[in-house]
Image: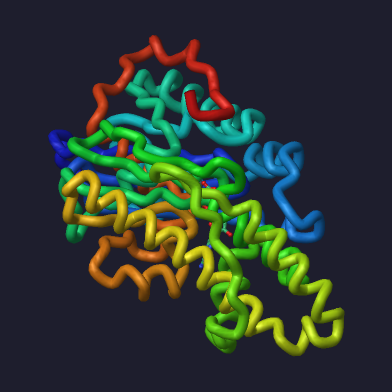
Amino acid sequence: MGSPTVVVILGIETSCDETAAAIVRHDGEVLSSVVSSQAALHARYGGVVPEIASRRHLELVTPVVRQALEEAQTTFGEISRLAVTQGPGLVGALLVGLSAAKGMAWASRKPLTPVDHLEGHVASLYLGPEPLEPPFLCLLASGGHTLLLSIREHGRSERLGTTLDDAAGEAFDKGARLLGLGYPGGSEIDRLGREGDRDAFLFPVARVPGLDFSFSGLKTALLYKIRELGEGEMERRRPDLAASYQHAIVRALTARLHEAAERTGLERLAVVGGVSANSALRAALSSARFAPLHLCTDNAAMIASAARYVEPLPYPSYLGLDAYASVA
Ligand code: KG4
Ligand code: ZN
């Protein structure tokens, strides 16, 4: 690496149950992206336990940063600036990453950029080797959010629709729990659904006005179907139930995305967030842009990527930054 003119960003992400650090060059090349998932730790509780997440981030953040530097074959001295997720997410978890980033930036007098996690997901599309450029229509579907965004330029988005109740990833996770599958549920349903018939059961998708989404009725429909089938039959038909349930979510997401495209005239479609790793969704939207799988779920490369389009805060003005739990 060596050249001091090349801007190199260290990104840190700790908003939920992934401790992540990445080294990204200003031209969008990802030099390393390390994600340490705590999923196994939270699995026995069926979801993320905030207090456990914070404690684990505290143990992992330094080793994960060190590993990211090693894998990028660089040193902390060669880092031009830092980027860190400020929100939305679990406040205790966010504070670990934010404090670590502040400490590292302050000690080395480097600038720091606070990044919105959702902007980060969108910025996963801007990374090399084939970055997508605005304008485009973006579906952001994660464990906490389901948003339709019109992206006219880097770092700026207009919200066209959102979920009125559960997020798409939450619907996957809750459905998986009803089906007796592990946590996190999305990838489990995805895996099991491949062995099932997606037309075996018809689950209703609520139609709400405008470009919004609603997934809570779907989960109830699955619950009633499972009760109707009984334990033994549910186990036997689990792949069909997973495939059909997944198909209902995919239908809801793709229908809204196409409607939004028609309304806005935006022709290029993109999907980001953890749910964009779903194989059925990727197959249903073959003309849309998706980030590579490892950049769909939470990671720090996307956080460093988003920071490329924002003026960083100079030393030491970032020391007063606070984390935020929800979208403003
Ligand atoms: O973006 P993300 O990693 O974290 C949040 O910002 O929430 O998204 C996590 C969500 C979880 O609900 C998880 O079940 C879902 O993404 N997910 C999937 C798949 N992989 C992760 N959902 C469906 N199919 C997948 N393959
Ligand atoms: Zn996320």
Left or right, 109 with respect to 20, comes to: left
Q: Nearer the viewer, residue 255 or 98?
A: 255
Q: Is residue 120 shown to the viewer in this render?
A: yes
Residue 77 image position (x, y, % from top left): 33, 34
* Picture quadrant of residue 291: bottom left
In this rendering, the answer to whether 90 lies above or below 65 is above
Residue at the image point whose x is 70% and y is 48% from the top = 48
**Residue 216 in picture, x, y percent from top left:** 64, 52
**Residue drawn 34% across and 55% down?**
257
Q: Which picture quadrant has residue 182?
A: bottom right
Residue sitting nearer the eye, 177 or 219? 219
**Count of number-bearing discs:** 0
- The residue under the point 46% across, 52% down is 141
User: Looking at the image, which residue sits at the far right?
Assistant: 231
Which corner quadrant of the image does residue 37 belong to?
Answer: bottom right
> In this rendering, would 180 be left or right of 167?
right
